[in-house]
Image: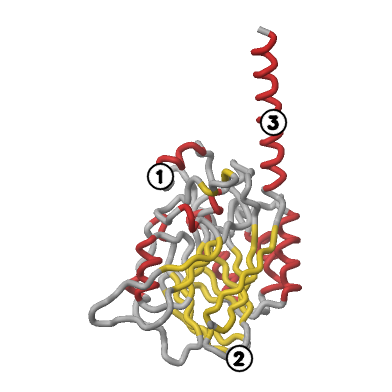
């Protein structure tokens, strides 16, 4: 009896310690630096700051200050792949965090959590497949967020294409609205990149394969996405258990290749597309934990290919 009690007590202590660590890790913000050999030979580097999944609330002051400090990196371009919000009163905190970066050319898309307020969910349900949009979730004031970011000069790309001049380069960027809640319509942005662009970038919140594969087939150089939280709770040596979409778990975060399809009438002689998935910076306020998957922003240095 005493042995059983000791085992149960030890298990409870271990669980409490793991939970305490997971809560600490959720606020242990990291900057990753990744080189992407995607530019033409001889081209100078282009620095792209990729942010995603802030899930901002008014009380997340440390996150606001940390994001604001990223302006010291002096990026050439900022791209945010959605889920800025996690509270109705979070727009001012988001703008406070991003204000030092708004003088830099930027582009963004929204995620489902920008449109709809968070609600409690059983974490084990993610093991059964991507989460559904619950009908009881209230709408957030996302039009105000879009208005404030676009008035500062950033480009909103919900099923839209644009070109941005940054660091002396012409960058074509196309984005889709959030595929996780089926707001994407890639047909509105489909087609080969502009011939006068120095690099072509695709942007989506959730990296569903229908969008990833379409961007690769069109010949884009690089795609950026978020949504997965890198798995949020990972097992050391195994990695993410879920991606909350149909992307392979091995691509839950970081940089990977997406092979271009062989097309009989329009074969590509370009290298495969690069895909960068950010593990993101925040979590739902109802699940403020991370394990073996710290929150992150990424400074992508686009370099000349070899």
* Residue at image mark 2: 168
Residue 263: x and y in percent read 27, 76
Instruction: Please name the residue that numbered disc 1 is placed on.
Output: 129
- On the image, the x and y values in percent for residue 82 come to 53, 62
Q: Secondary structure at mark 3?
A: helix
Give the x, y percent position of residue 7.
66, 18
The disc, 3 or 2, on the residue closer to the chain's N-terminal end is 3
Q: CA distance from mark 1 to mark 3?
A: 28 Å
Residue linked to disc 3? 16
Q: Which residue ends up furthest to the top in the rendered image? A: 1
Task: Please indicate whether residue 13 sits to the left or right of residue 209 in the image.
Answer: right
Horizontally, is 8 left or right of 128 in the view? right
Q: Choose top left, top right, bottom left or bottom right for residue 289.
A: top right
**Left or right placement of residue 157 versus residue 95 in this view:** left
* Residue at disc 2, secondary structure: loop
Q: Vertically, is 135 above or below 223?
A: above
From this view, report whether residue 256 is shown above or below residue 235: below
Q: Residues within 10 Å of mark 3 (few under 14, many from 20)?
A: few
Label 1: how many residues lie within 10 Å, few (<14), some (14-19) or many (20+)? few
Mark 2 is surrounded, within 10 Å at the Cα level, by few (under 14), some (14 to 19) or many (20 or more) other residues, namely few
Residue at 53% x, 39% y: name it.
120
Determine the image quadrant of residue 52. Answer: bottom right
Disc 1 + disc 3, Cβ < 8 Å:
no
The part of the image, by quadrant, that contains residue 301 is: bottom right
């Amino acid at each position: 009896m005493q042995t059983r009690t000791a085992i149960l007590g030890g298990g409870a202590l271990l669980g409490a310690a793991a939970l305490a660590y997971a809560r600490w890790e959720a606020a242990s913000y990291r900057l990753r630096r990744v080189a992407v050999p995607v530019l033409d030979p001889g081209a100078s580097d282009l620095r792209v700051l990729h942010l995603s999944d802030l899930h901002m609330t008014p009380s997340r002051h440390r996150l606001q200050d940390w994001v604001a400090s990223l302006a010291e990196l002096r990026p050439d371009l900022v791209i945010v792949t959605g889920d800025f919000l996690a509270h109705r009163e979070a727009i001012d905190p988001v703008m406070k965090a991003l204000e030092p970066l708004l003088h830099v050319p930027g582009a963004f898309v929204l995620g489902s959590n920008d449109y709809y307020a968070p609600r409690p969910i059983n974490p084990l349900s993610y093991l059964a497949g991507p989460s559904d949009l619950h009908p009881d979730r209230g709408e957030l004031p996302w039009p105000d967020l879009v208005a404030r970011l676009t008035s500062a000069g950033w480009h909103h790309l919900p099923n839209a294409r644009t070109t941005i001049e940054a660091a002396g380069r012409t960058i074509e960027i196309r984005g889709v609205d959030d595929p996780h809640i089926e707001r994407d319509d890639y047909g509105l942005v489909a087609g080969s990149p502009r011939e006068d662009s120095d690099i072509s970038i695709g942007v989506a919140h959730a990296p569903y394969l229908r969008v990833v594969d379409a961007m690769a087939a069109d010949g884009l150089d690089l795609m950026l996405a978020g949504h997965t939280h890198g798995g949020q709770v990972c097992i050391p040596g195994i990695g993410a258990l879920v991606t909350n979409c149909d992307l392979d778990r091995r691509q839950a975060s970081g940089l990977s290749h997406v092979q271009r399809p062989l097309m009989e009438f329009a074969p590509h002689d370009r290298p495969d597309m690069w895909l960068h998935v950010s593990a993101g910076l925040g979590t739902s306020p109802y699940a403020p934990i991370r394990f073996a998957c710290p929150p992150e922003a990424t400074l992508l240095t686009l370099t000349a290919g070899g």
